[in-house]
Amino acid sequence: MGKRHSTLALVMIAMFAALTAIGAFIKIPLPIVPFTLQIVFVFLAGCLLGSRNGFYSQLVYIGVGLVGLPVFTQGGGITYVLQPTFGYLIGFALAAYVIGIILERVETPTKKHFIGATITGLFIIYGIAVPYLYVALNFWLDMSTSWSHVFVIGFLSSIVADFCLAISAALLAEKLYKVFQSARGVTISQVERENMI
């Protein structure tokens, strides 16, 4: 059973990495920080894969982009770390991990747990992304700008839409979580524990 779970975990990690990449191309172009649907798959990865595998799915996505494949919103390559939006990608990985941790601590997660977890993940993303955006613009891109301007373009311009996506992803995750449990006859937390042994 452990081998089957390991194989399934690898498949799911790869799938959510691919979905996050696809989400990068479902976007509304905005100045400096485009609006994308990547965040939905970050939330779902954390909710459905658990802390460790959700985190791994985002690391795979980031790694694939940094080695040169154009899976990010503006291409790929190691120099992408200098992009002002790279902080969002760092936030994706940490958010998926924290979302998973929150839900793993509840024996039977309910709607409020999923919503609370995704909203927490949302603010983790912004908590990393906005300061990174400010530093990138002011220090290595030589685009001197104020904290207030960065707050507007990096937070206010998309927080309402992302908040709605967080709620929607939480509601979807709740349904998928139950289906996932029924199909496999095992809880996500049990899979996480087996993978840790």
Image: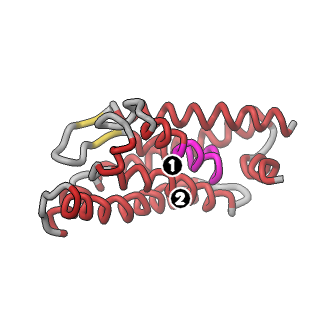
Q: Nearer the viewer, residue 60 or 119?
A: 60
- Whether residue 27 sits left or right of residue 179 in the image: it is left
Looking at the picture, does residue 141 appear above or below residue 66? below
Say whether residue 184 is magenta: no
Looking at the picture, does residue 148 appear above or below residue 76? below
Kindly identify the residue that appears in the image at 30 percent across and 49 percent down. 161
Q: Which residue position is annotated with label 1?
A: 170
Which mark is first along the chain, 2 or 1? 2
- Amino acid carrying label 2: it is Ala
Q: What's the distance in space between the residues labelled 1 and 2, CA to CA?
A: 8 Å
Q: Nearer the viewer, residue 139 or 164?
A: 139
Q: Which residue position is annotated with label 2?
A: 117
Which picture quadrant has residue 16? top right
- Whether residue 148 sits left or right of residue 53 in the image: it is left
Looking at the picture, does residue 136 appear above or below residue 85? below
The image shows residue 149 at horizontal and vertical percentages of 14, 63
Classify the position of the N terminus by image quarter.
top right
Kindly identify the residue that appears in the image at 64 percent across and 42 percent down. 177
Kindly identify the residue that appears in the image at 72 percent across and 47 percent down. 188
Q: Are marks 1 and 2 in contact (CB under 8 Å)?
A: yes
The image shows residue 173 at horizontal and vertical percentages of 56, 43
**Residue sitting at the far bottom:** 147
The image shows residue 17 at horizontal and vertical percentages of 52, 36
- Magenta residue span: 45-59
Q: Is residue 29 visible in the rendered structure shown here?
A: yes
